[in-house]
Image (cartoon, rainbow, N blue to C red):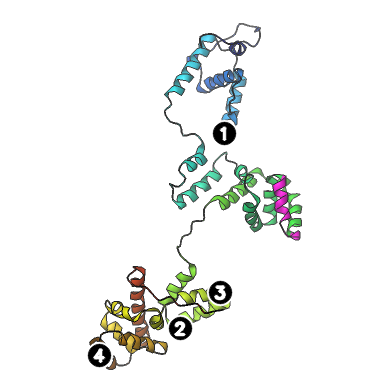
Amino acid sequence: MGHASIAEDRLLTTGPPAEAPVFLSARALTGRQKAAIIVRLMLAEGASVPLQSLPDSVQTALTTEIGQMRTIDRATLAAVVDEFCTTIEEVGLTFGGGLDAAMKMLDGHLSPAATSRLRYLAGHAPGADPWDKLREMDVPTLAPAVAEESAEVAAVILSKLPVPKAAELLGAMPGERARHIAFSMSKTAGVAPDLVRRIGAALLAHLEVPKVTAFDGDPAERVGKILNVTSQALRDDVLKGLEEADGALAERVKKTIFTFAHIPARILARDVPRVLRGIDQAQLVKALAGAKGPGVETAEFLLANMSQRMATNLREEMAAVGRLKDKDVETAQTALVLAIRELVDTGELVMVVEEEEDE
């Protein structure tokens, strides 16, 4: 800046002073004062300065500083501008944009759990207004979340949304609820700004945060796996309770249950030797000798599909084992079921899929 422009002249003089101006040297200026000089100069040159992107506290401090500044001589102005340009030229990389911008840049590289936590922090960051994002969301996205809220909270939400969007949401609600919400909106005048912001942050977190579940797979399948290794009495009792509470869930659980009695229907005859290979013989004897009801068919199925020599030895041991406790029999049969489950989970064995009954 070799020559002073008209804008500089307007910056340097605000009319003939009543007294001799007191000039500040560049060395005596604070960083905030230097920022005020740069902003004042850029505005005088007609440049667009996006101050609204700064935090409110910074905007307030900068405006206050500009209001307190007086006269700057040409040498000081030139020194401040030169320092500013040098600083800009030395910048190699910037990370502006806040947490939202950082998350967009790292999209696809973060785990779901980390993304969930960061989105929550973004919604609660100091100075962040969650309603800016909520106003941009469409009605189909907002409607289910608003429907879950109380009428009082829904009234706050609709009051913060654009009128057309709020009207569409209200119109999609049942008449009685719509009337209740409309009445509640008349009571929102005294709601504190901080409470409104917290409602917005909670709603944004509910809508934006990906649902990260602690458990994989179908809940019915998890219940079924647990019931597989419980006693028959407990299994029957739980299934009875499930049928009374939720018949559909009970049916799904039943389809996942695999017990000793299910072996003939789910295991191919040719796979029996593989299944029995790692089973302790004493446990196998108890499982077969103590079989009752449907379990008898399983015992005969296993004996018929192993080597004749092994089947003969097992039958002799079964005859000599004597009376067995029900608990010991269930423990032995459960060990066999778990061994089969392990082979299936590792891919060494494939169960036969039972065909669903026609409705």
Horizontally, residue 146 falls left or right of residue 215, namely right
Residue drawn at (29%, 77%), measured in percent from left and top? 274
Q: CA distance from mark 1 to mark 2?
A: 65 Å
Which residue occupies 53% across, 51% down? 209
Considering only order in the chain, which callout, 2 or 1, is on the residue closer to the N terminus?
Answer: 1
Q: Is residue 274 left or right of residue 170?
A: left
Alpha-carbon distance for marks 1 and 4? 85 Å
The magenta segment is 163-176
Q: Nearer the viewer, mark 2 or mark 4?
A: 4
Dot 3: element: helix
The percent position of residue 333, horizontal first and vertical second, equals 35, 82
Q: Which residue is mark 3?
A: 248
Say what secondary structure mark 4 lies in: helix
Query: Which of 36/96 is in front?
Result: 96
Return the residue at label 2: 233
Question: Which amino acid, mark 4?
Answer: Thr
Mark 2 surroundings: few (<14), some (14-19) or many (≥20) residues within 10 A: few
* Residue 144: quarter of image: bottom right
User: What residue is pinned by disc 1?
Assistant: 55
Task: Residue type at mark 2: give it.
Answer: Ala
